[in-house]
Image (cartoon, rainbow, N blue to C red):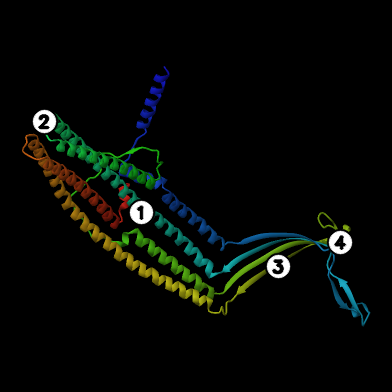
Amino acid sequence: MRRIFITTLIAFAFSAQAQDVKELTLKDALTFALENKADAKKAKLNVENSNHQIAEVRAMALPQLSINAGLTYNPILQQSALPGEIINRPGEVIMVPFGQKWNSNAVATLTQNLFNQSVFTGLKAAKTTRDFYTINQQLTEEQLIEKVSGSYYQVYVTKQQLAIATNNLESTKKVRDIIKGQFENGLAKKIDLDRISVKVSNLEAGRQQLTNAVQLQENTLKFFIGMPMEQQIKLPENTLEVTAEAFTDKVESSKRTEMALLKKQQQLLTFQKKAYQAEYYPTLSLSANYGYQGLGKEFPWFAKPADGVYWTDFSSVGLNLHIPVFSGFGTRSKVRQAEVSLKKVEEDIKDTELALNYGFENAKTQINNSIINIKTQKENADLAKTVLENTKNNYINGLASLTELLDAENALSEAQNNYTTAQLEYKLAEIQIIKSKGELKNLVN
């Protein structure tokens, strides 16, 4: 009974594990990545944080209110020297203490910027920063889509290669069994059986390597999309869909997120320059305060004049004008540094536009070449399969050598792998075409 229980438990565990396999289409993988990958999450948090940055800058344009309170005890009062004439004692110097032993006060202070060009410029820059992070979020998502798509197709192609290796292994095993039967009946040489056995061993080793490669690439894909490593996945069939379409549309760099991000960075640097220039402007602010103070020889809190403690309030209102006159050319230097930064961004924009056109033209050439290559390799694979079947029949009938049979198997394996590689090259080039058009998000929709 115990053995039956353990066997049942193991079978149930394997069954549960098999049921937990998640079928993952490319769209599913991209959607999962955009929702779970740390890069995508951090990009969203940057957009959220930009709203707090705007509120921080806006606060500088709003009234600032603060309350300060204090309690001071003076064990020894400072004395001042006064002439004796004030009390009809000419020629003498009288030391008179000023103040009280205890001093308690509470002051409320209000300040309001009336004119500060730096604050106004900073508010505009903060709003532009939010736009910058929004565009950066889009760029991060596009980069994630590109990376995940490439990894996804790598997994599929490696699985295809594993399937090819498995089929070739099974086919070679059948040939080995035939040669083994012939050898046992004295119709084949021992060297032929040894050679085919070595071929089987090599194919088994190659299949194991591909099995490991599939596992590694699946782990890479799961890492790229933020999926737990213990989650089992499988890819649906016919993932690599190839259409004989030549992409000849001219790419519009203005639609690319990279260009939009650089343009927004240029705008931010323009605001930075204006913020430095604002230091040439005068600033005007309003200040007001109201306070309440208690003085006396005794602890002032809750005390009255009868206790020797006297309370009084005070208030003031003022305008504060600050006019910068000379800063040692510090402001001028900061403005010129901002101008240099703007020129650098202009060069980045030109270089990025050139790089985008370069990438589009290369991808367009690659995809057209891949279409031709796919057709050629498909024909080669079909022809190699026919050659192998004919050679196998000829070998069985004694019309072909084992060397010819092994060469035919190698040719088929090579042709099938070349066909699969051509499909991968096509899909990778297709991703670059879609990227060049600024339409990577369409892969998710």
- What residue sits right under mark 4 in the picture? 297
Mark 3 or 1: in front is: 1
Q: Which mark is residue 197?
A: none
Q: Is residue 259 above or below residue 224?
A: below
Mark closer to the chain start, 1 or 4? 1
The answer for how far apart the CA atoms under marks 3 and 4 are is 27 Å
Query: Tag 1's secondary structure?
Result: helix
Q: Which residue: 45% across, 61% down? A: 129
Residue, disc 1: 143
Amino acid residing under circle 3: Ser
442 or 157: nearer the eye?
A: 157
Label 2 sits on residue: 186
Residue visible at 12% across and 31% down?
182
Between discs 3 and 1, the one toward the N terminus: 1
Q: Quadrant of residue 257?
A: bottom left
Residue 316 marker: 3
| Amino acid type at image mark 1 | Gln
Q: Mark 2 against mark 4, which lies toward the viewer?
A: 2
